Amino acid sequence: MVTGASSGIGAATARRLATEGFRVVMGARRVERLERLAEETGGLAVELDVTDADSVAAFVERVPECHVLVNNAGGAKGTAAVAEADEDDWRWMWETNVLGTLRLTKALLPKLVSCGNGHVLTVTSVAALETYDNGSGYTSAKHAQAALHRTLRGEHLGEPVRFTEIAPGLVETEFSEVRYGGDTERAAAVYRGLTPLTAEDVADVIAFAATRPAHVNLDQIVLKPRDQASATRAHREP
């Protein structure tokens, strides 16, 4: 099951896991995109809003068993300093990144454990490892999401379920357009002067982790473009 599957990393992950033989259940709000992807991959498209508990419950009920959950739904809004923080933006980021991950994981854990070889992969970010100016709403949400995910490793130790955190750096998707309220020029500037990761790059890593032998747990994978050293430091060509 892949959340946020209508575009970007989620869509690429659905395609990649389908090539590995998984029947992928794809969830997102933009159902028309999901349906096209389902036709392409042979998967199942189900409307999902991770910020809505009823939507999550309906999504989970569609599938009798689950072997892999990819918590990918999330995102950022705005770049305000703490002193100018917009509470609605913060609320959206925490609902989507943190509580969305909580709802899906909590609901599916019984199925993941009962299948005998479950795996939860949560897409966080280098923002879960660092902080940076004008990004506290997003970095705090990603830190909280990562803390939630990492806690599961100990709470379910000894059970047949694995936990992997995927923490990407700069990935060129719709992420920056959402963060900047649809300002495509500002979004494009985020990736200017370097070669960012693609959604397919991240999907390859997710698929690699998901297809390791059952006794192998890749706890955390951090991936960044070659030209990116940290959340705030990158080499850019003129």
Image (cartoon, rainbow, N blue to C red):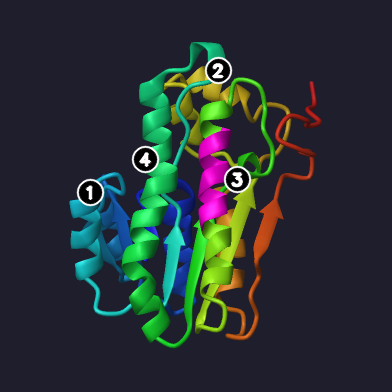
Q: CA distance from mark 4 to mark 2?
A: 19 Å
Q: Based on the picture, tell me whether residue 1 belongs to the magenta stretch.
A: no
**48 shown above or below 110:** above
Q: Residues within 10 Å of mark 1 (few under 14, many from 20)?
A: few
Magenta part, dominant SS: helix
Instruction: Identify which amino acid the numbered label 4 is placed on.
Output: Glu
Percent position of residue 13, x then y: 47, 60
Mark toward the viewer: 2 or 3: 2
Name the residue: 31% across, 65% down: 107
Q: Which mark is residue 82?
A: 2
Q: Residues within 10 Å of mark 4 (few under 14, many from 20)?
A: some
For label 3, the residue is 125
**Mark 2 / mark 3, whichever is N-terminal:** 2
- How many numbered marks does the figure carry? 4
The residue identified by callout 1 is 32
> Which callout, 4 or 2, points at the residue further toward the start of the chain?
2
In 3D space, how far apart are the residues under numbered discs 4 and 1 (Cα atoms)?
23 Å
- Amino acid type at image mark 3: Ser
CB within 8 Å, label 4 to label 1: no
Image quadrant for the N terminus? bottom left
The secondary element bearing badge 3 is classed as loop
State which tag comes first along the sequence, 1 or 2: 1
Three-letter code for the amino acid on which mark 1 is drawn: Glu
Vertical comparison of 88 with 99: above or below: above
Residue that label 4 marks: 95
Amino acid identity at mark 2: Val
The image position of residue 58, as x and y in percent, is 18, 61
Residue located at (58% from left, 35% from top): 139
Region rendered in magenta:
139-148
**Under tag 2, what secondary structure?**
helix
- CA distance separating discs 3 and 1: 27 Å
Q: Horizontal and vertical percent for residue 180? A: 47, 22
